Amino acid sequence: MVVVIHYFGYATETGAIREIVHNAEGLLFEDCAHALFAKALDADIALWSLNKFLPVVDGAILRSRKRGINVAYQHAVPLPPRVMGAYHQYLELNARLAICTDRAQVLDLENESRLAYEVYYQAISQDMAIHAQSHESTCIVASIDLELLRKTRSHNALSYYKAIPECFVFRPKPPMAPFAYPIVVRPPHNTEDVFERLLNVGVLAPRLIDKWDHIPKGDDRFLIEHTFMDQHLLLPVGDEVTYDDIKRVGACLQEVANAD
């Protein structure tokens, strides 16, 4: 099996890979967790994540195009109340974080939010039982205009692409409707400095090292992974983002670029 990942919503070319895999009688698995609206037409098996795009606690889509591989499930249990409670706490903390202007409080809220999320994430990633999507999440999905969401995220991603200096562009074209818009911060620029500058203009750009902290620091086996995480920040692209927000980000990053 070969796994192709559409990182950050950027489409990965799969045509040539599919031919190689099928000639070897293998399987092509497309990971579309970052690209909810990817069609994965070349995939034998594909996975989409809902909670990277929608305000839900659970839910994913797993599809198989191989008759001999059945990914349907018959028995599933609901998420425990403790897990749901932790996720609701996580949402409440992030709502407070979104309007917080005190730097010390921001750091405290980030830490509390991370701890609450870990309770939820540990349950869904280490407990191998298949969980049914919660009723709450099912109702949320049904209430959202997915086409509007796709258009909004695509539009905001394209606007970022046009607004930010070329030195921070992750790839030379905008992504599909992404879960976040990535910027790359290479030397002589410093990721921490750029993060602070964006925060000072009211934009929280999460660092990958904060999101994917399961890779041990100081372990030489993961130098490439740590370099990748250290050099990227994620800009919000949801419907809460305005054109003024994007212009403010562009101006901030232009100021950083001009400082050289």
Image: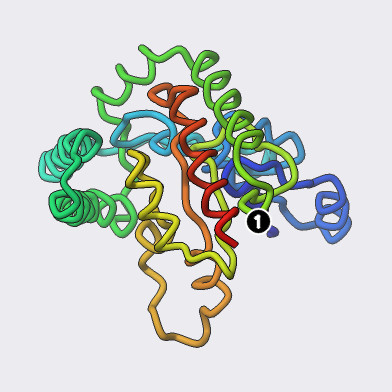
Residue at (42% x, 26% y) in the render: 241
User: Can residue 79 be spotted in the picture?
Assistant: no
Q: Is residue 119 left or right of residue 236?
A: left
Front residue of 50/130: it is: 50
In the image, what residue occupies the spot 59% across and 23% down? 155
In the image, 255 versus 22, the foreground residue is 255
Q: Which of the image's four quarters has the C terminus?
A: bottom right
Coloring scheme used? rainbow
Residue 19 visible to an observer of this rendering: yes
Q: Choose top left, top right, bottom left or bottom right for residue 67.
A: top right
Drawn side of residue 47 relative to residue 10, left or right? left
Viewer-closest of 5 and 44: 5
User: In x, y percent, where is residue 122?
Assistant: 26, 57
Q: Secondary structure at mark 1?
A: strand
The residue that label 1 is drawn on is 3
Q: In the rendered structure, which amino acid carries the disc numbered 1?
A: Val
Q: Residue furthest front?
A: 259
Would you place residue 240 above or below residue 61 in this image? above
Above or below residue 39? Residue 109 is below
- In the image, what residue occupies the spot 74% across and 34% down? 41
- Residue 251, position in %: x, y? 52, 39
Query: 16 above or below 225?
Result: above
Taking the spot 15% from the left edge, 44% from the top edge, the residue there is: 86
- Quadrant where the N terminus sits is bottom right
Image coordinates of residue 210 in percent, x first then y, are 35, 60
Position of residue 25 measured from the top left corner of the image (x, y, whole percent)? 81, 57
Horizontally, is 117 left or right of 54 in the view? Answer: left
How many labels, in total? 1
Mark 1 Cα shell of 10 Å, populated few (<14), some (14-19), many (≥20): some
- Locate residue 250: give its quadrant: top right
